[in-house]
Amino acid sequence: MYNIPKVKLGIIAVSRDCFPIELSIKRREAIVKACGGEIYNCSVTVENELDMLDAVADVMMEECNALVVFLGNFGPETPETLIAEKFDGPVMFVAAAEGDGDLINGRGDAFCGMLNCSYNLAMRHLKGYIPSYPVGTAEDIARMIADFIPIARAVIGLKNLKIITFGPRPQDFFACNAPIKGLYEIGVEIEENSELDLLVAYKAHANDGRIPSVCEDMANELGVTGNNYPEMLPRMAQFELTLLDWAKEHKGAREYVVFADKCWPAFPEQFGFEPCYVNSRLASRGIPVACEVDIYGALSEYIGACVSEDAVTLLDINNSVPASLYKKEIEGKTDYALTDTFMAFHCGNTPSCKMCADRAVKYQLIQHRLLEPEGSDPDFTRGTLEGDIAAGDITFFRLQCDSEGNLRSYIAEGEILDVPTGSFGGIGVFAIPEMGRFYRHVLIEKHYPHHGAVAFGHYGKALYEVFRFLGIKDIAYNQPKALPYPTENPFER
């Protein structure tokens, strides 16, 4: 995973000049110790604006890209909040709990100071991350810092991200509309290109000397049983190198790159294969390649990669689970109702490491029907990585800019069940509590597209905080039965 930032945290303690500065220093040192030294300890304790400038200069000289501002006592409202203005990165604000000294000379009143800190941040229109309960002991704050790291990683990544696209959306895929205004609002850059640009670059990589080594890596990844078309590996390796070189040559002033590419109907015939397997390989390295020019799908995948530090995928919220399969494999073995389950699918872009052992490179059945002669052996529609997606916890989520230019999001935690799908593509049986209601009153009601990003694990807490930090007002989730949606008919419950 080399396309996501590494977080280097610093901590700055602040002190109100009418409180003992030693209190902030002692409490800061205890936090650094509780963090196991995995945080830069700024020796400048901030009491005034000049201290603030010195402290920010110190942490930036140490190349910190995220910061903890610690109210060891009440704290000075102006300089502590100006840290967020002067520091170029996400800042978390936390405060000290009492209990490590007497309540005469050892009382810090940081519980009160945090209120003024929050008020001043709002007055100055500054962003600061404040945990759900931001006051604690050194050990409490060390845990808050651990929770902050994936949030900071995503925020830093987005600030330095460029989304590169090739081609317009396929016909009748208006659901993947992507007003780019929303990207600029959260600091993401975009470069839009033609499919012809990609084809020209691909042809220029013919006979590239690196192709054999990439083919060898692909063969090792797929194994004997997964490498159904070894003669196609050079074409796919050529394409992988094309995308990696394009990312390197076109990222410009940004550090990180993701792609959103048009993958049909012209692509397979002109390139000679389906791009899905290559897309899966890049996603496993932290470079999502979203299908069907789904710009916000690529953006969502990247956020998931930053939060989880793991491979992600993009899937269609595709089809219901047949009642017969539910009765045979799920009913009585879990607490899920039929309407809690669904199948999520895409042609073959899920990384190999997240699939069952029998995954293999195959051909795209739907595209074969559409693009190749009836009854013929598959030719250029080969190149999908197919099989059931491995069972385990997941978070299904998306950040989307709607047709009115408003950013909104959803997050739902669930799991992939250990149930054979008996179907094609990269596919799995998913279960999300109260999915039926969530599907109707969030996904349909709020006009979300069919694509959702998947992180492999439960990351709802961190994703929610990332979206809040970005200023997303509408963060939907799968609400429990006891909490009705605004659009839910009360007479149906």
Image (spheres, rainbow, N blue to C red):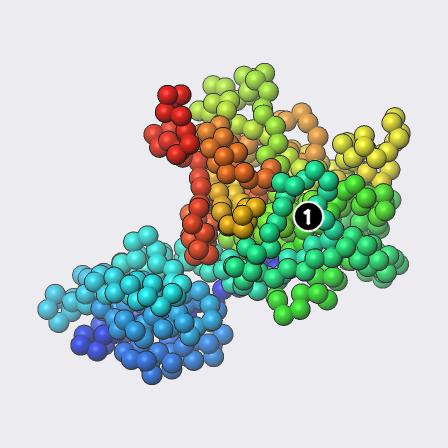
Q: From the viewer's perspective, is 491 left or right of 106?
A: right
Specify the quadrant of the image occupied by residue 272: top right
Give the image location of residue 232, x and y in percent.
Answer: 84, 45
Relative to residue 220, is residue 374 depicted above or below? above
The residue lying at 63 percent from left, 46 percent from top is 177
Out of 410 and 414, give the one closest to the viewer: 410
**Side of 455 where 214 appears, left or right:** right
Mark 1: amino acid:
Val
Please say if 147 is above or below 489: below
Q: Residue at x 52, y 36 (%)?
A: 443
| Quadrant location of the C terminus in the rendered image | top left
Residue lying at the far left in this picture: please name it. 104
**Residue at (55%, 32%) from the top-left corner?**
430
Residue 101, percent from left and from top: 16, 66
Q: Is mark 1 on a helix, strand or loop?
A: helix
Which residue: 89% across, 30% down? 373
- Quarter of the image that includes the N terminus: bottom right
Q: Which residue is labeled 1 in the image?
A: 293
Residue 361, position in %: x, y? 76, 39
Q: In which quarter of the image is residue 390?
A: top right
Q: Which of 272 and 449 is in front in this view?
A: 449
Q: In the rendered view, does 180 fall on the left or right side of 9?
A: right
Say if residue 69 shows up in the picture. Answer: no
Q: Where is residue 404 in the image (x, y as percent from the top left)?
A: 54, 48
- Label 1 crowding class (10 Å Cα cut-off): few <14, some 14-19, many 20+? many
Classify 85 as above or below 392.
below
> Vertical placement of 97 versus 227: above or below?
below
Q: Is residue 263 visible?
A: yes
> In the visual, does 157 lie left or right of 111?
right
